[in-house]
């Protein structure tokens, strides 16, 4: 595959038949590096979310049966999220994601790492929510800013080498 065929800007798509958001993005990294970037608490906190926030992990136990809790800070504002890791393996991560302000809005997220060869990996992320209204609310919330900013930060971390 040539580099012109890589998806270096995340695609964010709503499934027409299910309340699912699908995100696809290629990274110049191995599957192992991407897995580590999603499970190592120090690395994860450095790249996740929009540029305008700081992420603090209150708890991070990235293993099957583990749980997590984090806060996003922007000035005096604080937004907390939590979830559980249901399956953590080098091939995929399955976890829940809940914003504390909407505890009824739990999403089930599945991440898979597809080795494209030649030092590239495609990340497939899928978030299943409980309704089309909930899904559309996520899409209208500006989530794409966090996705694009976060992945740009991850690109830099991967290029600098600490996720190797």
Image (cartoon, helix red, strand yellow):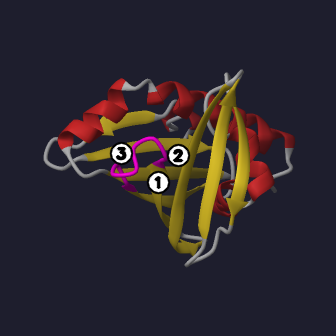
- As displayed, is residue 90 above or below residue 39? below
Q: Looking at this view, is 50 or 97 the one in front?
A: 97
Residue interval drawn in magenta:
99-107
Distance, label 1 to label 2, CA atoms, is 34 Å
* Earlier residue among tags 3 and 2: 2
Q: Is residue 12 left or right of residue 146?
A: left
Q: Residue at x 54, y 70 (%)?
A: 91
Per the image, the residue denoted by label 3 is 22
Per the image, the residue denoted by label 1 is 97
Residue 18, horizontal then vertical, whole percent: 18, 50
Residue 119, horizontal then vertical, whole percent: 68, 52
* Earlier residue among tags 3 and 1: 3
Residue 93, horizontal then vertical, whole percent: 52, 65
Picture quarter containing residue 37?
Answer: bottom right
**Residue 36 visible:** no
Picture quarter containing residue 79?
Answer: top right
Q: Residue at x 69, y 62 (%)?
A: 60
Eye-nearest disc, 3 or 2: 3
Q: Secondary structure at mark 1?
A: strand
């Amino acid at each position: 595959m040539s580099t012109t065929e890589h998806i270096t800007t995340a695609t964010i798509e709503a499934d027409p038949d299910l309340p699912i958001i699908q995100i696809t993005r290629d990274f110049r990294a191995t599957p192992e590096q991407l897995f580590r970037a999603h499970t190592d608490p120090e690395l994860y906190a450095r790249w996740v979310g929009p540029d305008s926030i700081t992420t603090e992990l209150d708890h991070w136990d990235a293993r099957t049966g583990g749980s997590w809790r984090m806060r996003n800070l922007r000035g005096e504002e604080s937004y907390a999220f939590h979830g559980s890791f249901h399956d953590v393996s080098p091939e995929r991560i399955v976890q829940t994601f809940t914003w504390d302000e909407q505890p009824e809005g739990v999403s089930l997220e599945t991440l898979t790492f597809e080795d494209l060869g030649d030092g590239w990996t495609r990340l497939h992320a899928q978030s299943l929510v409980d309704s089309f209204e909930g899904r559309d609310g996520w899409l209208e919330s500006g989530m794409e800013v966090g996705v694009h900013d976060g992945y740009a930060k991850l690109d830099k971390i991967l290029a600098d080498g600490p996720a190797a």
